[in-house]
Image (tube, grey):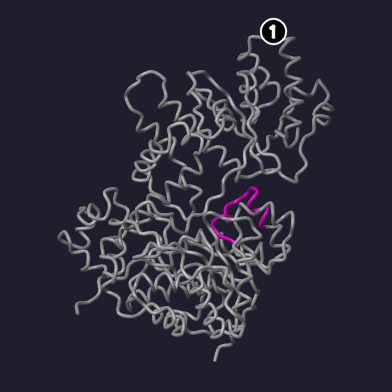
Amino acid sequence: MSAPRSLDVVQRWFQAVVTHPEGIDGGAASEEAQRLIRLKRGELEAVIRRSRNLTAAERLSIYANAYYARLLECLASYYPVLQRAVGEEVFASFAFEYLQHYPSRSYTLDRLGESFARFLAETRPEEPAELGWPDFLVDLAVLEWNVTRVFDGPGVEHQPLLTPEALQAVPPERFGEARLAPVPCLRLLEFRHPVNAYFTAVRQAPEGEEVPIPEPALERVALSRRDFVVRRFALTAPQHALLAKVLAGGTVGEALVTAAAASDLDDDALAAELRSWFRTWAAEGFFLSVS
Amino acid sequence: MKPPRLGHANLGLGVGLRSVHFDHILKTQPAVDWFEVISENFVDSQGRPRYVLQQIAERYPVVMHGVSLSIGASDPLDFEYLGKLKRLAREVNARWISDHLCWTGVLGRNTHDLLPVPFTEQTLKHVVDRVRAVQDFLERPFVLENPSSYVTFQDSTMDEWEFITRMAEEADCGLLLDVNNVYVSSFNHDLDPDEFIRSLPHERIVQFHLAGHSNYERYIIDTHDNHVIDPVWELYRTAHQLTGGVSTLLEWDANIPPFPVVHAEVLKAKQFMDEHLAVPAATPAEPAAEAALVGAGETVFHPLHTIVPEVE
């Protein structure tokens, strides 16, 4: 009997065969597999034994079929709304392509979907040239991915947060110079399509009911987490501008200037709104402290 | 002569922790002897999964079970991952850490599958060296499980049980005997499951796994989606007698029923700890086989472990 092949060769060959998009035959015939173990068609049994019931090809197919099916199921669990938007079949074809472009390189499945939005953007069809459903899908993927990250990322459960009362206690003359420390789970997102509203509509619609894909419209969203549940907040343009400045470490005064520039309201009306916003956001636990 | 279970505790009858049962367990604090957790679901978590695990670890003994160590791969060991395992094990006072005798990918890729190794002298030396390195690093008991497999290699020069025995003895590690996997692999590879179990070094078996599977007539897939079948319970009876009894854990990973059903399933093990008791008639000898094209449309098999986010 000849010497066994090296473990490295066998494993690289096995991986090339069972992860090949064209299945076992395509995998065994691929340049990569042939470079490692040169086999003619029908010679798989030179590497893999047959069993009483199955040929070598049938046995390898169990791994090959499971590879895409398993990871597709996992991706679908991260992108349930996107899957519902395009249907299971189209989602599966996206996932199939994605896994070839971005195979998992991590010990954790948690990162499997991290490049999905980028992949959808990179493979966007040329038509429609203007904003359309392909861009809607990219936006939706960004939203769903951020939901998963906020869910299992750093949070502030069981920590004291800045209360509306404590915020109100800051003397007005010092408020402009104050800096608010945002909670680590607060994320701001901007979309070209109202994907957050769509997300809500899909979750509220009965199973099987189609929810129409919305027309393009700017949408701004804050994500945060309370009691380990991700919460979504629709924001206006001035609200988003204000919170973005706070997240960037700016003072409240600098944030107000940014908000005013994004607002159609006059100064008095905006000032009244601001008090209400800060109260609401403090009550929602957006801030750890004020300094 | 090694003591039974390498001297580790017999924790009793435990259940694999799954996120669908989090609320039930926290609310009712069921009388389960211990929990096994999937390490990858928690090592990076800074959210609810980690918080739930911390609470469970305060009330129950916990064992960590991983699916990404890839002890049999030709790629280098991932010490970043091992460092995370070590920190989590310290945090939850894991009684031991386990993974599988398999590889999950090479060239930096992870297929997230438990892929079989060829049973050769080269593989044995490679795995033994790596088990020693892992044990030295983790500084905590480490045990390896026999996976379910669907192929065997022409290059193999020994049976799986011989490989496992030599690996455990040369690396001086413990074993997690998955009784269902013995049944599945033995069916798929035309082996005798009883001989498999009788040939292992019984004093090194620290833990048992039990699970259900899917029978496709010409082959069996380890789907963890059903009750344990009677032939597997019979193998468990044998394994129990040979080891004198070790920590026993039920895995249920797809079509997961309510927690009391899962718990009741592992409690059936008590009936096989005394050879004079009758076999319960609750479970069919083997579910009706589902004849099918190989690999087409079947349930995705273990491991698939994700936790669905909670969002309002």
Q: Residue at x 64, y 38 (%)?
A: A230
Q: Residue at x 38, y 72 (%)?
A: B187
Q: Residue at x 51, y 26 (%)?
A: A211
Callout count: 1
Query: Is B58 in front, or is A94?
Result: A94
Chain on which label 1 sits = A
Query: Is B61 in front, or is A236?
Result: B61
In this rendering, the answer to whether B105 lies above or below A225 is below
Q: Is residue A291 visible?
A: no
Of the residues shown, which amino acid type is indicated by label 1? Asp
In this rendering, the answer to whether B76 lies above or below A146 is below
Element class at badge 1: loop
In this rendering, the answer to whether B115 lies above or below A150 is below
Query: Which residues are drawn in magenta?
Result: B37-53
In this rendering, the answer to whether A163 lies above or below B291 is above
Q: Residue at x 52, y 66 (%)?
A: B211
Q: Say left or right for A66 vs B248.
A: left
* Whole-percent x, y for residue A5 in the image: 25, 71
User: Disc 1 marks which residue?
Assistant: A266
Q: Is residue B148 magenta?
A: no
